[in-house]
Image (cartoon, rainbow, N blue to C red):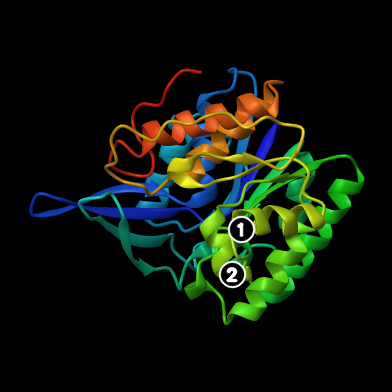
Amino acid sequence: MRLLCVGEPMAELRRAGGGFAVSFAGDTFNTAVYCRRLLPGGDRVGYLTRVGTDPLSDGFVALAQDEGIDTALVARDAGHNIGIYSVQTDGKGERSFHYWRDDSAARQMFRTPEDLSALDGAETLYLSAITLAIIAPEAREALLARSADLRAKGRRIAFDSNYRPRLWTDRETARDWIGRMWRMTDIALPSADDERALFGDADDAAVLARLRGWGCRSGALKRGADGPVGFDPAIVDGRYSPAKRVVDTTAAGDSFNGAFLAALLRGRDEATAMDWGHRTASAVIGQPGAIVAETPRL
């Protein structure tokens, strides 16, 4: 499997007329979809998670398969359901959310050896701090240990901090786990605002200096409309035009990550990967929803 993404998918409720339309999203799932769209047909992108046996969980699996995602590692849990969230956007495309995820089946991940051994088939493993936040502390410990073992065997770890304060017991706990994860990351894909909020960095240069000091040498720091900055100092950063239209910023960073990873998996250099990421994110935020109907061909 070229890329295995790990995390929590959710049913997305969005106002439509007098009611709500249902779709599916989740940070690492969004990345899996946008990466899969940019890879050749034979390159497998898988998703590892747990969902319920409820109709919404069935809908998620159907969507993942329609997008070409390998769902062999999507476990079904009769005792829990898929998580749900509602999203609203303002006139500038900024989002506000409400969540129903306490009974999410994905929270039960990595409590068994089978979940951990499922990681072994991936050339590149991608997860986020949301993945870490929703699972039990002992499961986090097991996941980090297995990730370290995979790195020792030559596999690559890609990570996005995606810091969400409400998912953590406190800021210090989040800083500890996310800091540990950064120190074993091969492809770093953070957002500048998340990193500053969590670690208190003074500016983007301070974020880059800290993460480079922790060993991050590949990847990109996402800065929204200003465009990304590479972690490799040898890369000459490009000039990035802001999106022409902003409707919904829900999956801006996730779509960037998917396109960036697709470029690397296709053998492109990191400057090209940043360009692909920025162009894809710019297209995605011009449409409503996390998984949009059309993305650019790159």
Which residue is outermost to the left? 18
Secondary structure under the numbered disc 1 in the rendered image: loop
Q: Is residue 53 visible?
A: yes
Q: State how far apart marks 2 and 1 are (Cα).
A: 9 Å
- Pointer 2 or 1: first along the chain: 1
* Apparent side of residue 273 relative to residue 90 in the rendered image (left or right): right
* Apparent side of residue 169 relative to residue 85 in the rendered image (left or right): right
* Apparent side of residue 219 relative to residue 102 in the rendered image (left or right): right
Residue 129 x/y as whole percent:
61, 61
Q: Which numbered tag is attached to residue 101?
A: none
Residue 132: quarter of image: bottom right
Q: Residues within 10 Å of mark 2 (few under 14, many from 20)?
A: some
Q: Is residue 61 visible?
A: no
Quadrant where the N terminus is found in the figure? top right
Q: Amino acid at mark 1?
A: Ser
Q: Which numbered tag is attached to residue 198?
A: 2
* Apparent side of residue 79 relative to residue 177 in the rendered image (left or right): left
Q: Residue at x 77, y 45 (%)?
A: 186
Residue 91 versus residue 181 in the image, above or below? above
Q: Amino acid at mark 2?
A: Leu
| Numbered disc total | 2
| Numbered disc in front, either 2 or 1 | 2
Residue 278 x/y as whole percent:
49, 33
Residue 156 x/y as whole percent:
78, 41
Disc 1 designates what residue? 161
Q: Residue at x 75, y 48 (%)?
A: 119
Q: Residue at x 77, y 69 (%)?
A: 141
Residue 61 versus residue 209 in the image, above or below? above
Q: Are marks 2 and 1 in contact (CB under 8 Å)?
A: yes
Q: Residues within 10 Å of mark 1 (few under 14, many from 20)?
A: many
